[in-house]
Image (spheres, grey):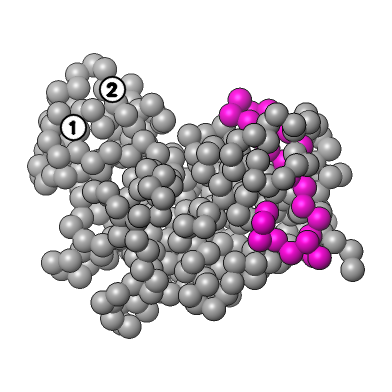
Amino acid sequence: MTKTKLGIIFGGRSGEHAVSLMSATSVINALDREKFEIVCIGITGQGEWKLYEGAPINIENGEWEKTAKPFNLGDLKKEVDFAFPVLHGPFGEDGTIQGLFEMLDIPYAGCGVLASSLAMDKIAAKQIFSAHDIPVCNYVTVEAEHLSKNDEAQAEEIEKKLSHKYPFFVKPANMGSSVGISKAKDKQTLIEALHEAAKYDRRIIVEEGVNGRELEVAILGNNIDIKASVVGEILPSEEFYSYHAKYLDGGKSEIQIPAKDVSSEIAEGLRELAIKAYRALDCAGFARVDFFFENETNKVYISEINTIPGFTKYSMFPLLWKETGVGYKEALERIVALGYERYYAKDNRQTNVR
């Protein structure tokens, strides 16, 4: 049997570089070597592409760069049959590298250019969700350029728009893995949070906090045939699910799969809403959809869609599918199959037009 030359692309020029290294190591270790020839291609924090042929453990610990060789991007189509980006955040999850694969005519895993870009931008995604009657919590957008002019006035305007209902969550519009996110409890911490978020993006979103639970659903599928996993819940080891709580607390944050005390009706509603949101952004392949569930009202608000969710040993996406009956290795193989399915469907349409 001819093996597929599977290019695992990791690292990248984003604040989530380290997370990508952890995810990529888990993916590489799980893949079936009888089916795939693994080609490891890393992108440094400065944007240099390198071919790595050493042990996967040295990807996670960052030592891979010491022995990696320069890689000519023009050779990508010759070196791989299929690209699997394990890149989180800007320059990887935002449609940029997906556009590169499209230009080079390489089949790839996950969402296309538009869905990746929309999902990465929290502001644009909320606008699309609202247009599709998918509930979002109250929010305000801020441009970083305005912060230095008058922090106090900017904070007061935000407080007014969100009816002074602290706490607020302040986030860079284009970032994931909780990088740059802060919880603001008053005006001073709001100002500090705005400046922290501005380190990562010029567009910032300030959301009204929801007193409730964070529930998540994993998705696999293209077009009509889309499947949703069981519902899981994050019980963070800190005040909210920060970067530290996700990746650096040694697994102290608790994950409950399936989520406890969620009725079958609510769970089914969440799965349906997850699929609706997935379709609204024209997602493909796989994703994880995150929700807030308000305790007092039982209302559900969509938080975001992660088009390349974490694949570490603590990550929700593989754990949700495991509980649903799809193991880690099988989930990865389905993602590859779905990428090929999308690629061939597009190729057939273009052939028919020509």
Which is nearer the eye, 101 or 43? 43
Task: Kindly identify which residue carries mark 2.
Answer: 146
Which residue is found at the position 56% from the left and 68% from the top? 220
Q: Is residue 248 left or right of residue 205?
A: right
Looking at the rendered structure, the number of numbered marks drawn on it comes to 2
- The range drawn in magenta is 28-51
Q: Residue at coordinates 74% horizontally, 49% vertically from top-left?
A: 7
Residue, x 65% and y 41% (percent of image)? 58
Visible in this render: residue 349?
Answer: no
- x 43%, y 75%: residue: 230
Dot label at residue 189: 1
| Residue 179 position in % (x across, y down) | 40, 39
Q: Nearer the viewer, residue 94 or 19?
A: 19
- The mark lying in front, picked from 2 and 1, is 1
Residue type indicated by callout 2: His
Left/right placement of residue 192 relative to residue 23 reads: left
Q: Nearer the viewer, residue 284 or 200?
A: 200
Quarter holding the N terminus is: bottom right
